[in-house]
Image: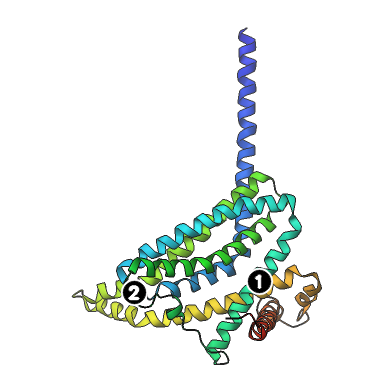
Amino acid sequence: MAGLIGYIGALADDLSAVAAKVSAGAIDDIANQTAKSLSKTAGILIDDTATIPQYVSNTAAKRELPVIWKITKKSLRNKSLMIPIAILITYFAPWIMAPILVLGGSYLAYEGTESLGEKLGFIKEHDHAHEHSIPDTQDLSAAEDVTVNSAVRTDTILSIEIIALTIASVATEPLSTQLGVLIIVSLIATFAVYGIVGMIIKMDDVGFYLKEKQNSLYQGIGSLLIKGMPRVLATLAWIGMIAMLMVGGSIIMHNIDQLHFLTYFGRELPFLLPIIMMYVVTPISLAMTVGVLIIAIRKLSPFQA
């Protein structure tokens, strides 16, 4: 009897050791796949970080963080709904992933091209402040809802791209790895992006706080932060636009078989030029081509507002 108990105890120890190894291996696999997925979605995360502050910049100072938190919660909710859908698509209709990615990439190409056209004066600039406000109303709650919903619409498109790129990168992995990577990427993408957005938006408030100090160094830093806020937002607008074009073009180029030849452009060039061609020049050129086509179709469409 004692021998049997000892055998069972030894077997339990062996099983525990195996389980620990499997668990450690699974965790390592999830960590590695998460790092790879984040590297593939970095452009979209930069785009998201650069775009969202433009929606919140006109909000009352005391309501900025609550509005950002509202957007964050809705972004998390949307991603939580997208994750099971993405897994189901991977198992039952994997062929849908490429069209989804191309549609998302085309949207980014259109938005980036339109933004560039507005900045260069080729396209009449939209009155975004008017679009995101409610005329003839004092209902601040309703105005906030408009701001939040506008930001969430943009975030939803970018979230779809993040989830689609992530699931595509782990499509051959076990279900547990897929689920783990999707959850971690979603959490990092949401809290990292909106944490940075919160810091950017409150930069001028920190500046005003420092200006009230008696220390001349603090006052100088405060003035720098206050004066720098408009420039930071303007720079972010350009960064977001370039990121949209780069990411959109790259997604289209890599998910349409007939366009794969574009990845070979400039490979014979010296030094770092092949990398610049593959990741910057070619994707942006393709995205602008697609964006111009979409803008032209919208202009010619009899159904436009």
Residue occupying image coordinates x 67% and y 45%: 175
Left of 251 or right of it: where is 233? left
**Scheme of image coloration:** rainbow
Mark 2 / mark 1, whichever is N-terminal: 1
Image height check: is 225 above or below 63?
A: below
Q: State the residue position of label 2.
A: 137
Q: Residues within 10 Å of mark 1 (few under 14, many from 20)?
A: many
Residue 155, percent across and down?
A: 53, 66
Residue 299 is marked as: none
Kind of residue at disc 1? Gly
Residue occupying image coordinates x 40% and y 75%: 133
Q: Residues within 10 Å of mark 2 (few under 14, many from 20)?
A: few
Residue 6, percent across and down?
A: 61, 15
Residue farthest toward the top in the current orientation of the protein: 1
Q: Is residue 223 visible?
A: yes
Q: Nearer the viewer, mark 2 or mark 1?
A: 2
Q: Secondary structure at mark 1?
A: helix
Image height check: is 81 above or below 107?
A: above
Residue 105 is marked as: 1
Please identify the quadrant where the C terminus is shown.
bottom right
Left of 256 or right of it: where is 236? left
> Residue 50 or 216: which is nearer the viewer?
50
Residue 50, percent across and down?
A: 49, 73
Please identify the quadrant where the N terminus is shown.
top right
> Residue 198 or 27: which is nearer the viewer?
198
Q: Secondary structure at mark 2?
A: loop
